[in-house]
Every structure is written in structure tokens, then in C-alpha cells.
Image (spheres, rainbow, N blue to C red):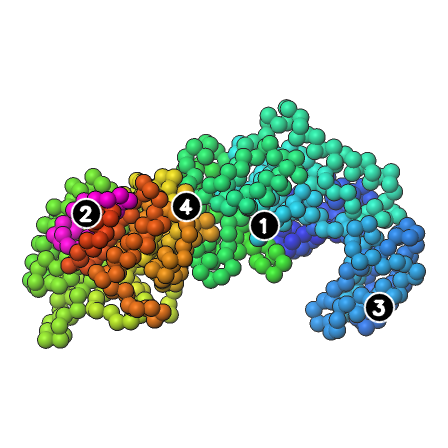
Amino acid sequence: MEFVITCLPGLAPLLADELTELGMTVTEQGSAHVGIQGDEQAAVGVCLWSRLAERVLLPLAKLDVPPEEAPEALAAAVDWQQLCAPGTPVHLSLDHGKGVRGDSRISSKRLLRALPGMEVARREEGACTVRARLDESQAQLWLDLAGTPLHRRGYRLAGGRAPLRENLAAAVLRAGGWHLESRAPVLLDPFCGSGTLLVEGVWMAAGVAPGALRRQYGFMAWRGCPRALWEPAMAAAAASLGRLSDSAVSAALPAFKGFDADADTLKMAMHNAERASVRGAIHFERRELGALRQRDFAEQGLVATNPPWGERLDQQEQAAWLLAGLGQVLAEKARSWQAVVLGADVTALDRSGMDIQQQWRVRNGALINFIRRSVPRPPVPRAPLRVSDAPGFELPEGAVPLLNRLRKNGKHLRRWLERDDIQTYRLYDRDLPEFNVAVDVYGDQALVQEFKAPSSIDEDKARQRRQWAVSAVRAALGVHREQVHLRTRERQKGSRQYQKLGGAQPSQYKVVREGEARLLVNLSDYLDTGLFLDHRPMRLRLGREAAGKRFLNLFAYTGAATVHALAGGARRAVTVDASRRYLDWAGCNLALNGFASEAHPLVRADTMAWLETCSEQFDLVFCDPPTFSNNKARNDFVVQEHHGELIRRIMKRLEPGGVLYFSCNFRRFVMDQEIVRWYQVEDITASSIPEDFRRNSTIHHCYAIRHGVS
């Protein structure tokens, strides 16, 4: 007999290979099906042992009739008494092909009414299941020997928010070579969700039949397949579960590790593993990608995972940066490993930076998924820009003073930069009256920020000074023009500081490293780059002190301090800011470092109002309010006027023994004496100003505030 084995569109090549390994004779291959030739035993074997198949269909009729005549013609073309045992109900699933008008439900009712004395079943379980398709000039009918779809193994009762089909999980593993005897000694899923990939991985490695737990199939109602054939076949499949209790098999199994950020999701995974009889074979742990360490990766292994893909646009952007974080973690800690990743967007998968070995395009319902097998790409260190004494190109005479000052500053900073491995720093800050600019280095990029000249300055002269400044920076750092970004700073009104400078083009983010954190900066699209360089020591301090603590970041900007706290081991972080754009940016920063905003909330709120309603306590708080902020919902915030009340509200949320680090950029700031009287206030401004800002000791004020009277 000829059988049609269906699968998810795009998986047919993998399915054909699997069926060949099972001893089947493959006769054809489409996008979503494979044809095989065999007897009833072969069909039952596919139902019980194929990990990738969705249905096993036996063709019953293929008629050249128009759709308006097809239902009755199909019903008459089959000897239903020979097909199903007396009293067996029939379950029908009928589809209209492209171009066929009308409601498929009406066609289904017509076909069922034409069946001679057959009872109609609403569900597939225990029924003789048939499937029909009506096209413009042809009608087809099949007997479904699987009954319910084969991906329903029976162990997963809880799938989480985005459950992964079992046969798609098996396809991911097969794409990664997990079906081979030479499989890696470790299978690790850093986003394990409900644990489907790991359960399928254990079953595959132990030789457990994917149909081991199922008790109902469509072939049980088929008269052509006697009980004497399928009953021992099902018993053999069920008995394969016993291999998991065999000490020799268990000892030979690879190591299985599943990590996830969500405790409830991990509970689902453990329950599913328990029902699949593999709970003892899998190590589950609540840990995020960013918290994985070198010891989690053996010498060799396979990462198989279905990372969060995001439903909203901002979540999709975060998911793309999470893939970048995954690629970075594997490049640093698992260079000899392979990775097979399921994703919904090729562009996002490209962010991982891994070298592609093979890719499969799969249609999963309404979604298009991609299975990509890759290997980590060894990181290529990109040396941060440093001032060079080497002669550059010839400069106009007017640019030479700035070049000399840049070289002087670079020489002064060089030892500090190398000793502390500084990647982002300020090289120049309006040292010369004629060059009213700041020059910042971000990795291998430079930013020249011109402070807008007064209207009394001739515009042509100002333009020439800008050109000289860019040329001097290029000569001092030895870079191309494309590596130098120029922008003009002026006093902003209303929401202008949030407006995009580059119009509607996609934002251009660059990754820079600061200590253990990787942060996104934007040097072309917005007035703000996303990183306050003068707060570098404070962020590093937070990272050193955050281990095991609950961290709160207020007026959080792009969440750089949150990233440092989480990279330092904070067990929970809450990030509060009133700007949606900054919070989206913070979410991408968290994702890039392997941390989930679901576990560490990003709260869009007015900080003063949020503190009034917050009931959570924290051990470590960082608050860096603006000098002035206007707000339509309440009176404007002025830091000198309102910081006392702000600090009092924060201290209500601070645990005894905790510390609040309070910083502000108002140069004439004076701490409220009531705060000094009621709390322990330590002025740490001097230690919080980095070497590259020593020329400007009033760039910010910083205090450590604790409970207790000064």
C-alpha cells in the first residue's frame, strides 16, 4: 500500500531521512509530506516511532469531480462497512482548496449525511478518522491512521505561553545531529520553557518511542489492521519507557540541562518531565542566560533552544538583542559547541553573530519559523580607540592646537585606560576656548559634541571650527571619517530631547563594553547616546555590591546601572523611568546581557508617584534624577527643591542595612539638612568622578545614604 506521511511544511527532508532510518521505503517527497510504500505494520510503525510525523494517511479515493458534486461522490466511492468495524463512529475533517467557494462546514455535513448508516463522532479519539480535500476539479479522501496528531505525545499537559510542538522540537534536535550515535555529551537549553526540547532529547537518546504514552490511534478503528498486529506493536512502544530505568542505559545518557528565568515555567517543565518519566535525567534550574558561567559548559555540547521571539515590536527588538547575547555567551564560554536555534526572524537570528552551517524554513501554523544550526564565532577583540603619536594626514593650521591637546590628554589617560581596560571615555571637554566641543570615545567610534555657539558667532566661522575639530580627532585617533560622529548640543525644550534626529530610518545601535556589561549606544539618531560616561565608577560599584540583593533603579535612563547590578549577581531588579523610549532601550540592554524584563520589571511611571504606591523592599537603590523635569500629571520636578521628599520616599522602601546611592548633575546642589539629620549621609562625590572627568569636579554630586542618624 501507499501511505502519505504528513509533517510541518519544510520538514519533509528531515522526515524522509528519519523514515529511511526506520526501514521505510520512501517513494516521494513534497514540502509537507513524504510518500512511503509498505504494509499495515509499516503504517503502525510510523505512528508509534516517527518523531517528526504529524499524520499517517491511507488514500481511499481520488475523483475528478467539481466541488459541488464531491461530497456525495466521495461518500459513495468507499465501502464504509469494510473500512470500519460496525458501530464505530466516523470523524471527518474536510478542507476546501484554493479557489473553491463556499463553506467547508457545509461540504462536511453533506459528506457525513451521505454515509450509509454511520454514526458521526465529534472527536478523533476512538473514531474512524477520515480527511477530505476538495479542489476545483478534484476531490480526495484519506483514512487518518494517527487519529489525533502525532505531536501529542501525552506527557505535556502544561505548555506555557508559547508551547513548542513535540515534533518540531524533535526536528530541531535532529537538525542538530542529536539522533546520531556520535551526539554530544551535553544538551543544554538556556530558555527551556516547558521543557519539550529536553524531554524529546532524553527520549531520543534513550530510544524511547514517541508513541510510548499514547493509548489511542486511528488505526485501532481500521478493519484492515487487526488487533493482533497493533496490540503487540503498542506494547513494545510502551515498554521502551522501561529503558529509562535500565541502569546501563541511564549511565550512558548524556547530561541534560534546562535553564529559565521564570519559576512557574520551570515548574511546568518539571511536571512534564515527570509525566515523561525523565525527571531524574534532566537538571532544571532557575537561571538566566546572563547568569550562566563557564562551569555550565563542558568541553563539548549542543545548545538547542527556542528563545523568546516577542509578540510586540519592542519585545521583538529585545528578542533580537537576546540572540546577540546568546551568541556572545557561546563565543566566550562554549567555543567548541554547536547550537541549533528555532527563530521567527532571520534578521534577528543574524544578530547572534554565529557561523551558519545549515538552515530550514518551517511553516508552523500561521508562523514561519527557521531552524538554524550554527557554531559560535570566536570573538575578535576590537581594540578601543587610543590617541596615537604617529604622524597623520596634514591638518589646517587652525586645527593643530586641538590635535596637540588631544594628544596631551591621551598621554595623560593612557596608563589608566590600559590598567582598568576602559572602552568608553571622555578625551576632551572644552579645554580650549576656540574649540567648544566634547570628544568621547565609544569603543572604535568617536563622538564630537559641539555646544551650540551664540548667535553673535559667524556661522561660516563656526562651520570651519567644526570641520577642524573633526579633522583633529581623526588625526589624533587615526580613524576614518565614518568612525567620527558629529552632533550639536543646545538647550532642549519639552520633548525635543526624545525626538529622533535621523528621521524614520532604523536606529543604529553599537555595542560597547563596560566592565562585565555590554551596553547599546546610539551615536547618530538621538541627542543622547544612551550612556552617561561620568557615572562609570558608580555603575561598576553597583555591580560589585549587588550580589544576592534586590536592586531598584530610579530615573533609570537606558538601564545601564540595572545591567551592571544583574551582571554582578542581583537576584531581582526593578527599573523605573517615565520615558517609553528609554525603557525600550533598557529592555534591549538587559536582553543583550541575557536578562529578561519579565523577571526584572521595566516600569513606566513617574518616580515620585510610583514610590507612593510601591510596597516592595530593596537592598540597593540607585537614583539619578534630572535637574529639572516637567510633567503634565503633576507639578514640575526640581531636584534642589524636591530631592528631600524624594529621598524620604525612597528610604521607606530601603531595607535596614541597605544603601541608597543618590546622584544629580545640578552643579550648585546642596543636600537637604533634614536628610542629613535623619539619615547617615556620606558624600562620595570625589570617589565617583572618573579620571577622564577630573578636569570638571562638579560634573555631578553623589551620596551614599543609609538608615540611622548621622
Please check the rendered image and state whether residue 701 is part of the magenta-colored stretch, yes or no.
yes
Which label is found at residue 235? none
Residue 304 image position (x, y, % from top left): 53, 43
Q: Which residue is mark 3?
A: 110
How far apart in space, not on screen, are marks 4 and 1 (Cα)?
22 Å
The quarter in which the C terminus is drawn is: top left
Residue 113, position as x, y percentages in the image: 87, 66
Q: Which residues are magenta?
A: 686-710
Mark linked to residue 572 = 4
Sooner in the amino-acid sequence: mark 3 or mark 2: 3
Which three-letter amino acid code belongs to the residue tagged 3?
Arg
- Give whichever of 31, 401 is nearer the camera: 401
Q: Secondary structure at mark 3?
A: helix
**Residue 511 at x, y = what percent?**
33, 52
Residue under label 2, please give it: 683
Q: Earlier in the sequence, mark 4 or mark 2?
A: 4
Query: What's the CA distance linking mark 1 and mark 2?
Result: 48 Å
Q: Nearer the viewer, residue 159 or 377?
A: 159
Tell me the element at label 2.
strand
The residue at the point 46 percent across, 31 percent down is: 299
Q: Which residue is mark 1?
A: 160
Whether residues under marks 3 and 2 lie with C-beta atoms below 8 angstroms apart, the answer is no
Q: Please state if 472 lies on the left or on the right of 302 as rendered.
A: left
Residue 308: x and y in percent read 51, 52
Indicate left or right for 499 with 305 as reference. left
Residue 157 in sight in this render: yes
